[in-house]
Amino acid sequence: MLTRKKLTKLLYNYALITVGALLYGIGTAVFSDPNNLAPGGFTGIAIVLNRIVNIGTGKWFMILNIPVLVIGTWKFGFHFIVSTLYATGLISVFTDFIAHNLQQYFVTDMMLAVAFGGFFMAAGIGLIFRAGSTSGGSDIIIKLLRIRYPHIKTGMMLFITDLIIIFFAGIVMRDSNAVLYSVLVVLVTGWVLDFVLYGRDEAKLLYIISDRNELITERFLKELDVGVTNIYGQGAYSRTDKKVIMCVMKKRISPLAEEIVRQEDPDAFMIITSASEIFGEGYKNYFEDKI
């Protein structure tokens, strides 16, 4: 039985899928399809097939997804197939509805189509992924690959598979300009998708070796409200035992940390490096947010 919390979460996820499907449909029908852009994935294949047999890009998208959805049901279960069927069905409906009823809003400028088409499609896919679903097609294949290769980001995987599809689309369409513009769409889509999925959660990782370790730690805890870990080490030359402060913090407050170290110990040895993804308290939940 669904609790109120689970029902709220379920409704929220399906709302995300609905908005994501609408954005994806806009990206396809308003920007990509009218300009012969085949931006990879099953959408790109559907656009090419619709040039051969004109039954609607959205319908082709749904037809292509049927065998992949069967595989998805076997691998990910009933809940997955329900949400994915909902997503693919809405994308199909939105794409064809917009294509047939909103032609006056189609964008014909190629650079605008590349930029905004890539943005809308990536934002749509990202929202659907965040809801724990996929838009079908190559997204299911990517989801399977993520299980085997979790260290490779989703955007990069989509980029590789999309390039392969664009290559074959170029052969069919015989339009080298459209092929090159399609590559640009894929680049935009990959960048925006990673932004939607992973966010700008870049942080700074600090290692500090100082004789005033306790004062720096106390100020970090009190003034910056960040966690601090002491790592115990030993100087290779002096053989002196030392405590090394290790601390990760949001990018925007790292200058304050640097100023605290400068004030307390100008001679401190400090290493500052970037951390692209942080999981744990105050940051992302690994099990919920890793996509």
Image (spheres, rainbow, N blue to C red):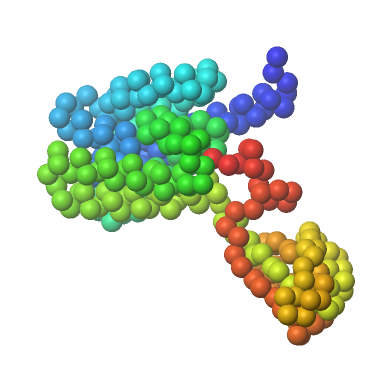
Query: Which image quadrant for residue 258?
Result: bottom right
Question: What is the x, y in percent for residue 192?
Answer: 45, 51
Query: Which image quadrant for residue 243?
Result: bottom right
Left or right for 78, reference 267: left
Question: What is the x, y in percent for residue 165?
Answer: 26, 40
In this rendering, does residue 21 appear at all?
Answer: no
Residue at the farthest left position = 174
| Quarter containing the N terminus | top right
The one of 231 and 267 positioned closer to us in this rendering: 231
Left or right for 136, reference 265: left
Left or right for 39, reference 287: left
Residue at the farthest bottom position = 266
Q: How many marks?
A: 0
Relative vertical location of residue 245 with respect to residue 142 in this rendering, above or below: below
Q: Residue at x 64, y 42 (%)?
A: 286
Question: What is the x, y in percent for residue 116?
Answer: 36, 50
Relative vertical location of residue 136 with respect to residue 122 in this rendering, above or below: above
Relative vertical location of residue 157 with respect to residue 177 in this rendering, above or below: above
Q: Residue at x 48, y 41 (%)?
A: 149
Q: Residue at x 73, y 51 (%)?
A: 282
Question: What is the x, y in percent for residue 56?
Answer: 25, 27
Q: Residue at x 32, y 43 (%)?
A: 162
Relative vertical location of residue 9 with respect to residue 222 in this rendering, above or below: above
| Quarter containing the C terminus | top right
In this rendering, does residue 42 appear at all?
Answer: yes
The one of 209 and 189 positioned closer to us in this rendering: 209
